[in-house]
Amino acid sequence: MLGMCRRDQWRIDDLDWDVTPRPLPREHEIAVCQYFTDMSGIELLAGELFRAQRAQTDDPVLKEIFTTFIEDEARHSEVATRLAAHYDVHHYRDYQLNPHLVRFREPFVEAVHHLPPDIASAYITTGELLLDVALLRSLDDFVDDDMSHRAMRLINRDESRHIAVDYHMVEFYASEGYDRWLEARPEKSLDEQARSLFALAVMLWHAGPFFRDVFFAPMDLTDPSGKRLFEAFKRIQLLGERPGVGDRPFAKFIRTIQGAFNDPILGAIFGPLLQRVIGLDPRVINRLYTEEDVRRYHAMSFDEMAQEAIGVKYQQPQ
């Protein structure tokens, strides 16, 4: 993996930015420019997660891999900024990061540095699957222009490496080795535990509006069928059903919220509150998998699951 990370680096100016963009209707040009602007901020958030993971590992190879991932995300952010400018042909408005993304960013970074690394891993894996399997592919199809295609092809190549390592880290955090690592850590003070819980609460409070405006609203325009969105969240849910993964406290918390939301009585009474707590659209809090899906996933290795996820993003939704 480290060899691939070194070999497959690329420069922003490897792309020809002088090509003429495909004409877009006014409302589509505005949407595309805003989505690429927000993508630039999302990629920097992903870089913060990899920075936290780099700080939490003692493995020198993983440290170097995460360093290349941080560089990847910074490059992706700059490419997204340039794509927003490239398609801003008519200058209909001044594009800024979505305010909900801005409000989410600081609590998110704070939480990542205070919470256990398995929670950071859960968020990076969820975010990468949602971004790579659903949002970027749908946005690229929506733009349907050579400039976007060339940029996304290179970004997707990077993101495939990220997903492979994401699954590797999920496997580690579900292992007895991680349990031993946790036991060897100095116990957190009550003050640090309180700060961790507060950071998580503030992050979750801002998560709902962030996901709604920056992920779900763009997906409703670029993938109105929702098929890519459901495919990404189906894999996220199935990963949480994996033995070891689902035994972690944060995974249990998410599954408890999901179970209550899907309960006919509890969901009817507490549905809006549960939706705000988990920060997700009701469509993806609903269970998206079958028992057969669970059995198939339990029989796969983490590497096989990663390779399947990587393959899915290149498929057209059926």
Image (tube, grey):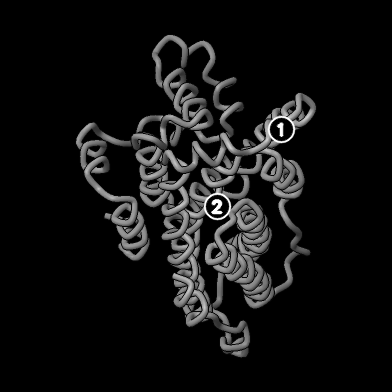
In the image: residue 20, left or right of residue 224: right
**Image quadrant where one finds the N terminus:** bottom left
The residues bearing labels 2 and 1 have C-alpha atoms spaced at a distance of 31 Å
In the picture, residue 265 is in which quadrant? top left
User: Residue 29, can we see it?
Assistant: no
**Image quadrant where one finds the C terminus:** bottom left
Amino acid type for the residue under numbered disc 2: Pro
Disc 2 element: helix
| Pointer 1 local density, CA inside 10 Å: few below 14, some 14–19, many at least 20 | some
Q: Where is residue 181 in the image (x, y as percent from the top left)?
A: 54, 41
Q: Position of residue 8 (x, y in %)?
A: 48, 80
Residue at screen point 59% across, 56% down = 58
Find residue 294 and name its label: none
Q: Which residue is tagged 1?
A: 196
Disc 1 element: helix
| Pointer 2 local density, CA inside 10 Å: few below 14, some 14–19, many at least 20 | some
**Tally of marks:** 2
Above or below residue 189? Residue 124 is: below
Q: Which residue is tagged 2?
A: 218
User: Residue 122, can we see it?
Assistant: yes
Residue at screen point 46% across, 16% down = 267
Q: Where is residue 218 in the image (x, y as percent from the top left)?
A: 55, 52
In the picture, residue 40 is in which quadrant? bottom right
Most extreme residue toward the front is 184
Q: Where is residue 48 in the image (x, y as percent from the top left)?
A: 67, 56
Residue at screen point 53% across, 31% down = 250
